[in-house]
Amino acid sequence: MAKPYYVGDFGNITIEENDESEFKVGYVFSSEINNPSRFETVRDEGRIADVAKEIWYVYRSHRYAFEAAAGLTNSQLMLADQSLRPSYHAEQGKENRLRYFLVLADEHPKDLEIRTEDKDGERILMLKKGNGATSGSPVIRRKEFKLVADVRETPSSILRHIPLKYKKELGFSFNKKSKVYNPMQTNSQRLKTKVRLQETSYGPLEFHIELAHDQGSGLTVNGLRWPIREYEAEVKGIYRPNDKIDVKENPQLLGIGEEEIGHLCEEVLRVEQEDFIEFSNLYLLSKTRDNPDRYGDINIEPIYYSKSHPGLILLDDFISQGKKAMKSLCYDKKGDPRPFNW
């Protein structure tokens, strides 16, 4: 089926919708817990990055074994070097991700994230409206819109031309006089794979879950940094046994709506989150006995916000002052964009 689209300055802009369900878990130092200035202090990022990656590989093997015990793995795939790999997992390593996060000059909604990146000659704008996850409801559910345009299209023109019904759904208005600024970026490397889980509330169903480990940092245009040390899991698809139609995208096949699908995803991801936190804490406890200097001050805790949220906190003084302050932050006196000094 053809994707919905609207017309921009340089041709059609396609729209893809998705109801995103995921959880995030962060690796933090003990001194950072409940510390309001946690993003302002440079710590031993190399050590915590190594430990986080170590946990990722050990937990991944644990999760594969759980999947195999449930009879959900495909037959093994033999690679050219004669090594064996479960064919479904589609492991991907070291995906470099440089992303720009945008802020609307006029009343940027607190629950809205706007992210942009250029890829293969296209400009991709992601708009995500979140649910405000909490400790009582740790799964982040967001309505996601993926807008794909010609690389010459500016973020302003993409947002200006977006149909009114989407603006209303996302909670903002944007016209010719509106401004959007690029005050922060994230630069990270991602490791990821996929696993499956069976769930039976609506009969036998397979949940295809993407696991990811993201490590890097965020940077504001005026040089403030924050760490990115995350593990996350997201439901990418739901399938009936031996069926290739994704019921996450077509919930009517189960006689239910998007909200019920969201609840199913929440139930599954809550179990995944509890398993990861328990496994990681036991691993750290075990390793700390032998090497407290390396492992003793590292903790695992849930994250309820997006990658751009710490940047919004660091830039709150500028954002709260409006257009004039944001313009001086993002542009020099000649009107040229200020560079990000990575």
Image (cartoon, helix red, strand yellow):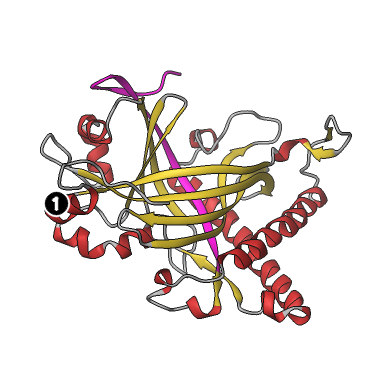
Q: What is the secondary structure assignment of the residue under circle 1?
A: helix
Q: Is residue 4 magenta?
A: yes
Write the residue at 23% across / 35% down.
Answer: 156
Write the residue at 61% across / 74% down.
Answer: 298
Front position in the image: 210 or 315: 315
Q: Residue furthest right?
A: 82
Report crowding for label 1: few under 14, some 14 to 19, many 20 or more residues within 10 A (C-alpha): some
Answer above or below: position of 44 versus 127.
below
Answer above or below: position of 273 versus 278.
above
Residue 290 horizontal side relative to residue 141, left or right: right
Can residue 287 be spotted in the picture? yes
Front position in the image: 75 or 186: 186
Answer above or below: position of 193 versus 296.
above
What's the magenta bit mostly, secondary-structure-wise? strand
Can residue 275 be spotted in the picture? no
The residue to which callout 1 is attached is: 323
Write the residue at 50% across / 33% down.
Answer: 250
Front position in the image: 1 or 242: 1
Which amino acid, mark 1?
Lys
Q: Residue 29: image x %, image y %?
A: 55, 74
Front position in the image: 300 or 339: 339
Q: Residue 232: image x %, image y %?
A: 56, 55
Answer above or below: position of 67 versus 298.
above
Q: Is residue 69 magenta?
A: no
Q: Residue 283: image x %, image y %?
A: 73, 70
Write the residue at 76% across / 43% down.
Answer: 72
Q: Residue 163: image x %, image y %?
A: 23, 31
| Range drawn in magenta | 1-27
